Amino acid sequence: MQDILARAARIRLVIFDVDGVLTDGSLFIGDGGEEYKAFHSRDGHGMKMLQECGVQIAIITGRQSNVVRHRMTSLGIEHVYQGQHDKREAYEHLKTQLQLPDEAIAYVGDDVVDLPVMSLVGLAVAVQDAHPLVKRHSHWQTPHGGGRGAARDICELIMDAQGKLEAQMRKYLTWGGDLPA
């Protein structure tokens, strides 16, 4: 676990896949072709807290969806790459634009299409219900599945490794006491 915390302490950008990571992977499509996705509210709040701690967030997803654009806008996420069948191009663009080394970047994925980018980053994360090959090639696996708190798991891991989690949680304590152990 020490290696994971050391990796997480260096992270300045977290890249999330969407389907299977920020959602449970289900695709709901209406008769008129409208697409619906369910996002976990605690994941969103974790992403907001992580951004408050100075860690940037990006999205790289293979699908194109207005729902994703709306959700990411509501979370204040500026770096959104949709329709990326080869995610390495978007990754290289982000890395260059933000002037970050691979070691300062984490990627959270769930399926084999995520492996090319996961093999490049300083912290490769598989959600709990990821494909077995993705789990095998990750540095860490979230305790929760995609769309069920996995994003919150990685956000809290990074905040903890960077010494910022307790301060974030303390903001929500109304009695002013110490956090429970």
Image (tube, grey):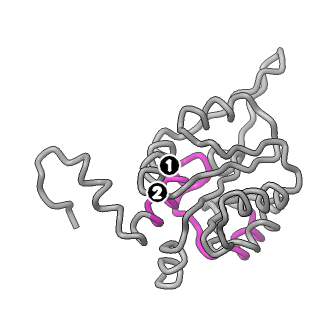
- Identify residue for label 1: 47
As drawn, the residue found furthest toward the top would be: 32
Q: Residues within 10 Å of mark 2 (few under 14, many from 20)?
A: few
Instruction: Please state the extent of the stretch shown in magenta in the rendering.
Output: 131-158
Q: Could you say where residue 38 lies in the image, as x and y percent from the top left?
A: 61, 34
Q: Is residue 61 above or below residue 5?
A: above
Mark 1 element type: helix
Q: Could you say where residue 90 lies in the image, as x and y percent from the top left?
A: 80, 54
In this rendered view, identify the residue nearer to me: 86 or 13: 13
How many tags in the picture? 2
User: Residue 113 — which label?
Assistant: none
Residue type beneath disc 2? Gly
- Identify residue for label 2: 54
Q: Is residue 133 above or below residue 170?
A: below
As drawn, the residue found furthest toward the bottom would be: 2
Which of the 4 image quadrants contains residue 69?
A: top right
Distance Cα–Cα, label 1 vs label 2: 11 Å
Residue type beneath disc 1? Met
Q: Could you say where residue 165 lies in the image, as x and y percent from the top left?
A: 35, 61
**Which residue is drawn at the image coordinates 65% and 56% (left, top)?**
15
Q: Is residue 54 left or right of residue 103?
A: left
As drawn, the residue found furthest toward the right would be: 85
**Which residue is drawn at the image coordinates 88% and 56% (left, top)?**
86
Q: Is residue 67 above or below residue 31?
A: below
Residue 141 part of the magenta-drawn span = yes
Q: Is residue 31 above or below residue 157?
A: above
Mark nearest the camera among 1 and 2 is 2
Which of the 4 image quadrants contains residue 135?
A: bottom right
In this rendered view, identify the residue nearer to me: 175 or 129: 175
